Image: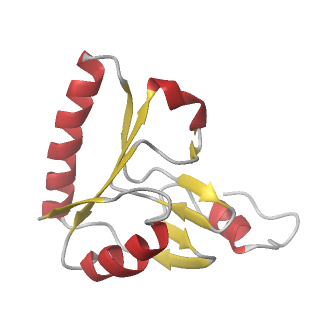
Amino acid sequence: MQAALHPPKTIMEVYRMLPEGTRAELINDQLFMSPAPSLSHQDSTLDLASEIRSFVKKNKLGRVFVSPVDVFLNKKNAVQPDVVFVFNDNINILREDGVYGTPDLVIEVLSPGTEKFDREEKKKTLRKVWSQRILDC
């Protein structure tokens, strides 16, 4: 991380200054941080993402990513869903530092530590942007 030449003016600028790999999300201009997910959460996410990625690659449909990957929805919202899929037709929303726009599929794997936040705050705020799929583990 580089030292800032100018102090950040927006919370999005603060978000973008966080060190790579920081587990944080920006929802309605509020910064939310969380620790690494539990092993069962990671196991479920990896199993699910592996199946999806295998199918997507076999059929040459697009790209699949697992968290942490930044999805920049607008100036006030940047999230790190557990699994993200983008069809080839929408590949232009991908940049080296994240996804800029609405992915074709977003999956949040719930675990006890994040379930309330994911089901309430995050889902309520982001329902306008995509239809969220939920897997309880």
Q: For the point 24% across and 42% down, which residue is it?
A: 49
The quarter in which the C terminus is drawn is bottom left
Q: Nearer the viewer, residue 42 or 78?
A: 78
How are the colours assigned in the image? secondary structure
Say whether residue 95 is visible. Answer: no
Q: For the point 14% across and 44% down, which residue is it?
A: 47
Query: From the viewer's perspective, is residue 121 above or below residue 65?
Result: below
Give the image quarter of residue 11: bottom right
- Residue 115, how many percent across, how many down? 25, 77
Left or right of 119 in this view: 43: left
Q: For the point 59% across and 43% down, which residue is it?
A: 97
Say whether residue 54 is visible. Answer: yes
- Residue 118, how many percent across, how many down? 33, 73
Query: From the viewer's perspective, is residue 21 above or below residue 53?
Result: below
The quarter in which the N terminus is drawn is bottom right
Left or right of 77 in this view: 112: left
Query: From the viewer's perspective, is residue 30 above or below residue 12?
Result: below
Give the image quarter of residue 135: bottom left
